[in-house]
Every structure is written in C-alpha cells, then in structure tokens.
Image (cartoon, grey):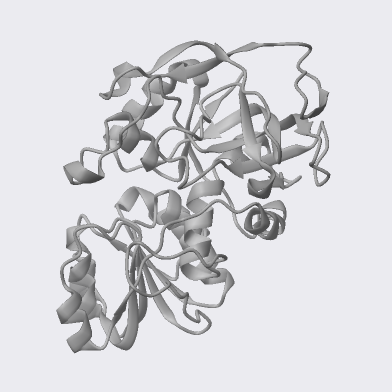
Amino acid sequence: MNQFEKMDNSEGVSMMKAIRQYAFGGPEVLRYEDAPVPELKSGEVRVRVHAVGINPPDWYLRDGYKALPPEWQPKVNFPVILGTDISGVIDAVADDVSEFSVGDEVYSMVRFPTGMMGDSKAYAEYVSVPVSEVALKPAGIDHLHASGAPMSLLTAWQFLIDLGHHEPNGLQPAQHQPVSLKGRKVLINGAGGGVGHFAVQLAKWKGAYVIAVASGKHESLLRELGADEFIDYTKTAAEDAVHDIDLVLDAVGGSATGRFLHTLKRGGALFPVFPLGFSATEAAEKLGVTVSATQVRSSGAQLAEIAPLLNDGTVRVIIDSIFPLAEAHKAHERAALGNIQGKIVLVVS
C-alpha cells in the first residue's frame, strides 16, 4: 500500500490483465496480457473495472491517428493501453480524497483529452482516475450500460446542453455555445451511433422537434427514442429533403458536413462533432449560419448531473454489441464494419 492509499481491497494484487499494444496498426496489434496495477497519486481513486465503453478515439490512437496531418500525429511511449470510458467499483482512494469511498460504484471518462495519447488506460482490470472525473454510477443501470455513456453522452451534452468548462478552444477562436432547443427544429445526422442516439434523446428532452438521419436499420429504435421524423440516408439525401432547420448536429462531420448549410435558417447553427476538413466557412457567413464545434472534456460534475436522466430512463444507453476484454480486437473489428447502433462495450471478468 503506497503513501496515498486510505484503503485497498485488491489484497496486495500487483498485476492485472490489460489490453496493450506495442506498435500502431489494425485490431491485431491489441494484446491481452499482464500489466502492473496502477498506483494511486494524490487526488485519485482506483477503480476495479467491470466494463469499458469503446469510442472512435480508441481506434484512431490504435492506428496512429493516420487521418491527422503528420505534425499532429501522436508520439507515444509503447506499450499503450487504449480507452477512456469505464464503469466499476472503487478499490482504493488517496489520502486527500473525501468525496468517494472504497466500494462506491462509479463511472468515468478518464483523462480526456489530456490522456488521449494513451494515458487514460481504460482497457484494463484496474484504472486510476482523477477524482474530478468520477461520478457515482446511476443505480438504475448496470455497469455495461454505464460504461457506454461517458464520452458519447458528454459529447452530446457539451455540444447541445452545457459546455461546462472555460478551456481555450483549439478548434476555433470563440468558445462553443449551445443554443436553445425548445420548440426548435433540430436535425441529427448519424443519429444511430454513439453520440447521435444520445443527441436525439437530449434534444427531445429539451423540447425540440427532432429529425434523425441514419440508415434504415435504425429507424424503429430512433423513433422509440423520440425522433419525430426519420430520413434513411441510403435512400434520400437529407440535405435535399429538409429546409428551415434551426440546428444541425452532424455526429459524422468531416469534409462533407458543409452540405447541411443550405438546410438551415438564417441565424441557424451547424455543429460538426468531427470538424476537421470543414472548408465552407465563407459560405456559412454569407448564409448567416453559425458553425461551431468543441472538444469533449472529462467532467465528473457533468456525469453526476446526467446520472438522474440515465437512472430514470429519460436517456437510454443502447448497446450494439458486447465483447470480453480479452477480445478487444474483435470489438475493434466490429467497429471497423461501421453502422454501429449505439455503443460497443467490453466486459471485464
């Protein structure tokens, strides 16, 4: 037991199972092996992980962020442990932590974006977490569903409801600002995925008229989650089918997001979750449309605020598929197939 630990239920365990990689590459680089249990530092808790939610930054880092310009690509110290989203039980707390106790069930998005180059280390049996990034797990859902929430739900929340921080925005000169949703017509592109299915629910909760865009397999679910209209993008180009929209949240983003500008009212807003490649800034200005994005950031306070919505079913976590931690490579193979409905989750034995 080190100097920071108040209590330790791991019975002297010094090694754990984790997924590590020693080079960038495809899913085959992910190895299930022994790794040291993380030691606590001041201001941290250690969590015995029950489930891990996987997210796009996981596979971006796995392959070396190839989509980024070379000067932006990561320099990491191998071996790397991927992942940010966890749900589990606190196993130990540092001496200076009073907010949580050993045995508390918690969930978290760990060290993001500060740890996005491999310092979050969530694909493991134990994870150390800054106390500011932890919240009590909603009692009404299990660890599998709780682990699927943090990054995707915080992304939707920070885009649509409350940014929740004052960090400089490296994506644009001004801070991102959510807009009023009550009575507004909101289009969610990529509505069947992780961020998208949460965005549909949050927009509906706030009183918006929601148009969901996804492939046909998602229609029934998205209507169940509150979508007022559904557009199957494999049959109809959404940008040709709608007009006078107040807000487009493009959960797909990228260079093609500019196609939604002409669907918006003057004074409307386009929020691309993945803004890299957007090049229609001048056109947006001429149309009187605000284009704004932000980088999701870890926040235990926001996860605590969101927890009642998960607890009472106002917001549901939809699980696409579940894999054992040892088969993380198969989870990444599933992700590469695309058309994910909700979240992919790893269960830790």
User: At x 33% / y 73%, what residue is drawn?
Assistant: 173
What is the residue that sits farthest to the front in this orientation? 3
The quadrant of the image that shows the N terminus is top right
Q: What is the tally of numbered marks visible in this picture?
A: 0
For the question of whether residue 65 can be seen, the reply is yes
Camera-side residue of 238 and 163: 163
Q: Is residue 98 left or right of residue 68?
A: right
The percent position of residue 103, horizontal first and vertical second, equals 82, 31
Would you identify the image quadrant in which residue 263 lies?
bottom left
Would you identify the image quadrant in which residue 89 lies?
top right
**Position of 78 relative to 277 (above/below):** above
Camera-side residue of 136 and 172: 172
**Position of 133 relative to 40 (above/below):** below
Q: Is residue 346 left or right of residue 65?
A: right
Q: Is residue 115 left or right of residue 61?
A: right
User: At x 35% / y 72%, what residue is drawn?
Assistant: 292
For the question of whether residue 226 can be seen, the reply is no
The percent position of residue 213, horizontal first and vertical second, equals 32, 62
The quadrant of the image that shows the C terminus is top right
The percent position of residue 314, horizontal first and vertical second, equals 64, 60
The percent position of residue 143, horizontal first and vertical second, equals 65, 35
Camera-side residue of 122 and 226: 122
User: At x 44% / y 30%, what residue is drawn?
Assistant: 82
**Position of 304 relative to 163 (above/below):** above
Q: Is residue 158 left or right of residue 294?
A: right
User: At x 27% / y 59%, what residue is drawn?
Assistant: 253
Would you identify the image quadrant in which residue 21 lies?
top left
